Amino acid sequence: MIKTAYYREKSVAYGMSHTRLKRILEFIPGDCALRVLEVGCANGRLGQEIKKLGHFVAGIEISGQAAQNAREVLDEVYVFDIEGEWPKKLEEQKFDLVVLPEILEHIFDPVKVLRDAYRVLQDDGEIIITTPNFMVWTNRMRFLFGRFKYEEQGMFDFGHIRWFTYSYLKEVLKEAGFKLIKENHIIFPGKLTKIFKYWPSMFAFQFVIKAREK
């Protein structure tokens, strides 16, 4: 598949910023052992940090090479395209937390994928999502002056086929059966986070949210 070929090398080379890693980990308790599923685990860097908190971590990855690397640090790794059918063995399991870091912007139907994640959650389970804010103020300025082009990495990565605004992200969550419960966005400029965090639609460079069943 074209998608598999595209992510074969991209997933192996995938890196996560220290800030995003920190914001995600701040949402994960360390006082009780959880079963965690990371969707798009790449080489397992995030999952490895979650394991250090005492949790069981399974991963999903489309790239076989990245999955092979992830198996060295995670408890379980499944290789498949999340936009297709999920393996029965995985669907039979239940997780306390599903993490989707920078995933929704890469898929055609985010509602379908979130509903699949919903099915593997415990009744009181939660999800953590990170995704870029398409309408962050820097992009608004760029568009105002007619500037747009795709890039190898970043907001306008060739692999991004969905873009999210604050309102659209909440709409997708609601349609998939979730409600937003916590926000921990990455604000730009970071020095003004205490002020601008109240206007995520404008100043969040990346949305970082936690949600649970409605």
Image: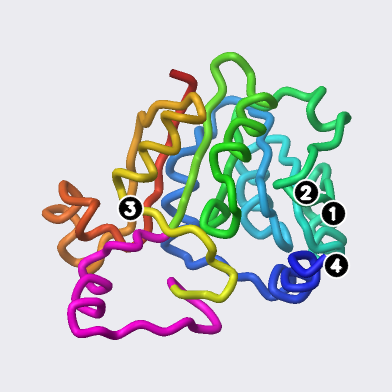
Q: What number is the disc on residue 71?
A: 1
Residue 114: name its quadrant: top right
Mark 3 / mark 1, whichever is N-terminal: 1
Q: What number is the disc on residue 165?
A: 3
Quick check: marks 2 and 1 in contact, CB under 8 Å? yes
Q: Which residue is mark 2?
A: 74
Residue 95: name its quadrant: top right
- The CA span between labels 1 and 4 is 10 Å
**Magenta residues (range):** 132-155
Q: For this rendering, which residue is in front, 143 or 116?
A: 143
- The CA span between labels 2 and 4 is 14 Å
Q: Which residue is mark 4?
A: 65
- State the quadrant of the C terminus: top left
- The CA span between labels 3 and 4 is 32 Å
SS type, badge 1: loop
SS type, badge 3: loop
